Image (spheres, rainbow, N blue to C red):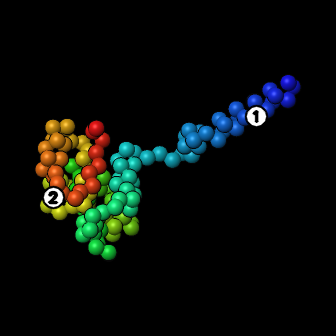
Amino acid sequence: MRLFKPVILALLICSFVLSPAAAVSGSGVTATSDQLRALFVQRLPKYISWPEGVAPKPGKPFIVAATDAKSLKPYFEAAGVSSNFKLVQWPAEEFHILVLTGAPERDVAAILKRTAGRPVLTIGQIP
């Protein structure tokens, strides 16, 4: 019984020190929701099985149309990102990815209706 209490205490301390929350809060790394959204948009296309002829040709960027392109623009202009992605403001004629942020639900519904049937990756925050 004497050994049991110190072992439990040691396990509790280790679980607290090694927990993800402690690692994130102690790392000093912070990101805005726009930065995280841009990162998500930039990472997601490589996990998508694009229909034949829909994905950009090799060497060409993914065209990302966003309802709030202004808030994402700084994170798409970073070195290296701009060669893989081209950010444009919605409405746009040609795009591979549509990011619906900052738009009212009614507008989002109209945009989705307008793009229905098109091979577009749609990313939004409204269920």
Report the amino acid beneath label 2: Ala
Residue 17 lies in quadrant: top right
Q: Residue furthest top?
A: 1
Is residue 33 among what the camera can see?
yes
Which badge, 1 or 2, is on the more N-terminal residue?
1
Instruction: State left or right for residue 10 relative to residue 90.
Output: right
Q: Report the residue marked by disc 1.
A: 10
Is residue 69 among what the camera can see?
no
Residue at the (75%, 30%) spot, across then down: 9
Residue at the (30%, 63%) spot, across then down: 50
Give the image location of residue 60, x and y in percent. Answer: 29, 72
Give the image location of residue 4, x and y in percent. Answer: 81, 28
The residue carrying pointer 1 sits among few (fewer than 14), some (14 to 19) or many (20 or more) residues within 10 Å by Cα, namely few
Which sits in the foreground, 1 or 16? 1
Residue at the (18%, 47%) spot, across then down: 112
Report the amino acid beneath label 1: Ala
User: Which of the labelled discs sits on residue 92, or is there none?
Assistant: 2
Instruction: State left or right for residue 24 relative to residue 40.
Output: right
Instruction: State left or right for residue 14 relative to residue 96.
Output: right
Residue at the (39%, 66%) spot, across then down: 79
Labels in figure, total: 2
Per the image, label 2 sits on a secondary structure element best described as loop
Up the image or down, 12 lies above or below 110; here it is above
Residue 101 lies in quadrant: top left
Q: Residue furthest front?
A: 52
* Quadrant holding the C terminus: top left
Query: What is the distance, in whole Å, between disc 1 and disc 2 at their CAs?
Result: 58 Å
User: Which of the labelled discs sits on residue 98, or is there none?
Assistant: none
Give the image location of residue 123, x and y in percent. Answer: 29, 49
